[in-house]
Amino acid sequence: MSDSSVATLAGTAMAPRIWVAMLLLYGVLALASLGAGRWTAPDSALRQQINAWWRIFPVVSLSMLLYPVGPVLLSLLIASLALRELSTHYVGPRWRFQAVCVAVLLLQTALALHSTAMATALLLALLLAQAVYCGLRRQPAQILLLLFLLLSAGLSFLPSLLQLTPSSTVNLAWFFYLFALTALNDIAQFVSGKCFGKHRLAAHISPNKTWQGLVGGVLASLAVSVALGLYLQLAGLPLLLALGLLLSLAGVAGDLVFSAAKRRLGIKDFSQLIPGHGGILDRVDSLVLTAPLLYCGLML
């Protein structure tokens, strides 16, 4: 039997498991909401963080239901909201900044229709060039453009992730794995940091990040990676453990990169779009690095 036939058979058996796992995720969220409602104050940061996921998870779920168009639309939605947020911090005629970003987005989309690898290569080249230029100039406008290119480059790996195997169901399972692990890693870091955090991880960049939060996120990510990966029959235990560790650390790194940019820009949050989370960029900063890392890890 060919590899494509094996992948197709595996995907067919996996399909119901994805939706069961999604329902379990909503169940965990519901329990967390009930616990936060009972044990925290109405205006507590923890309650706001948990409740905000009721806005985020349905959007991701809808993108999966609309596969293969849904994930692409989700990427465009994130990029559009990010552009809107970054524009509010641009000093000068905003249309100039928006025009450049829209041109990049249109070029990325056009190239992705022909070749996702070509789109990713172009974005990485633009990102590298902008990083060098930003290092020389260090102007707020250049930092904003660098952030948009970094986001676009990270999101460009989502379409590639959906083409990993001949089975669309297997690819969709990895897509769900990525978002579930990234989200639960963020939640675990926040909760463990609030409950046990004493030693700051990067005080000058993100004062709320602690080593205890990092450890909590890593442990949760390892558990989720193994449980979800084995249940969805995605990979063996060694690979799932490695991915859980690497994606957890990548999520923290992405958060710190955007936090450093906010420090440089003199802002706390990119916007107040999502109560308890800030803006869309405050929420997807981890995904910018976890998506490329997962794709590269699976392609090795």
Image (cartoon, helix red, strand yellow):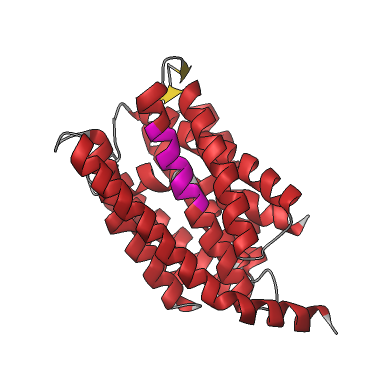
Residue 93 at what x, y percent from top left? 25, 46
Quadrant of the frame with the N terminus:
bottom right
Q: Residue at x 55, y 43 (%)?
A: 221
Q: In this picture, which residue range is highlighted in magenta? A: 181-191
Q: Residue at x 42, y 76 (%)?
A: 65
Q: Is residue 189 magenta?
A: yes
Towards the viewer: 252 or 8: 8
From this viewpoint, is residue 156 visible?
no
146 up-or-down from 167: above or below: above
Residue 53 at what x, y percent from top left? 31, 52
Horizontal arrangement in the rendering, residue 7 relative to residue 209 (left or right): right
Q: Residue at x 57, y 45 (%)?
A: 223
Residue 28 at what x, y percent from top left? 38, 53
208 up-or-down from 141: above or below: above
Magenta-drawn stretch, dominant element (helix, strand or loop): helix
Quadrant of the frame with the C terminus:
bottom right
Q: Residue at x 20, y 43 (%)?
A: 37
193 up-or-down from 241: above or below: above
The residue most toward the right is 1
Q: Is residue 48 magenta?
A: no
From this viewpoint, is residue 236 visible?
yes
Residue 57 at what x, y percent from top left? 36, 59
**Residue 244 location, quadrant:** top right
Towards the viewer: 102 or 298: 298
